[in-house]
Image: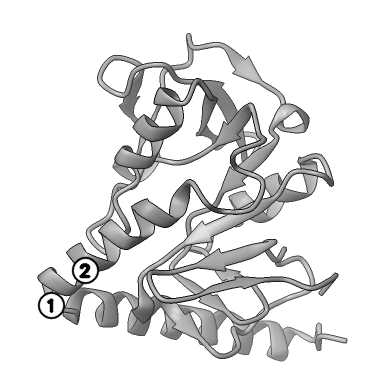
Amino acid sequence: MVDQTPSAAHDLIAAKRALRHSIRASILATPLETRRLEQAACESRFLELPGFTQARVVCLYVSAFPEELETRPLVRMARSLGKIVVLPRVDRAARRLVLYVVDNLETDLASGAMGIPEPRPDRPMIEPEAVEWLLAPGLGFDDGCHRLGRGAGYYDRLLPRLSPNAPTWALCFESQWVATLPRADHDVPLHGVASASRIIERAGPS
């Protein structure tokens, strides 16, 4: 049981904030050529992630920060395979992500929250329950397939709304792995995490 006292909650927030800073610094300190090699390896691994081949509707995201894997090639690969690709748009009033179908990265996106490219609101919307496979962003990941996001909690609210049969995965740089992440009860683990050198699939409920 996670300690839910105010002091424990404050300590957890502080631990996550410090870890975000250190992981981001570690990624950016990695030589650019190393990151390019890891990027290429992750792109190759993407199509082999469990459940992706069978899924028709896949939820991806568009990277926007220098410490992130570049995901536009993944979106294009999914589209070239005939997948229905959906991307998230932040609804700040409702504090949730809304999903929209995207056909063309050049014409279907606009700058959104924090400057992150998001689908234009006139794109077709799709309910989370219709998603058959999802790739999640994150700053850090651990061996239990938990993820450390950027602190807004949007994906922790989105993931429980997916079908229980929809695999949820992440791709990351080697420097994003940690043995164990600090986490709260509401933090939702993924089904698996993969990098250039390894792949971890969660055995059961956390």
Q: Position of residue 63 (x, y in %)?
A: 34, 47
Asked whether residue 59 appears in the rendered view, the answer is yes
**What kind of element bears circle 2?**
helix
Residue at 66% from the left image edge and 46% from the top image edge: 51
Q: Answer yes or no: do the residues labelled 1 and 2 have beta carbons within 8 Å?
A: yes
Please determine whether, in this image, residue 62 is positioned above or below residue 67. Answer: above
Name the quarter where the N terminus is drawn: bottom right
Q: Which mark is residue 31?
A: 1
The answer to which quarter of the image holds residue 111 is top left
Mark 1 is surrounded, within 10 Å at the Cα level, by few (under 14), some (14 to 19) or many (20 or more) other residues, namely few
Q: Is residue 55 left or right of residue 79?
A: right
Please determine whether, in this image, residue 88 is positioned above or below residue 20. Answer: above
- Give amino acid for label 1: Pro
Residue at 66% from the left image edge and 34% from the top image edge: 55
Residue at 71% from the left image edge and 89% from the top image edge: 8
Q: Which mark is residue 163?
A: none
In front of the other: 110 or 178 = 178
In front of the other: 76 or 1 = 76
Name the quarter where the C terminus is drawn: bottom right
Measure the alpha-carbon separation of dots 1 and 2: 6 Å
Please determine whether, in this image, residue 87 is positioned above or below residue 2. Answer: above
Q: Position of residue 58 (x, y in %)?
A: 58, 34
Mark 2 is surrounded, within 10 Å at the Cα level, by few (under 14), some (14 to 19) or many (20 or more) other residues, namely many
Q: Which mark is residue 35?
A: 2
In front of the other: 81 or 169 = 81
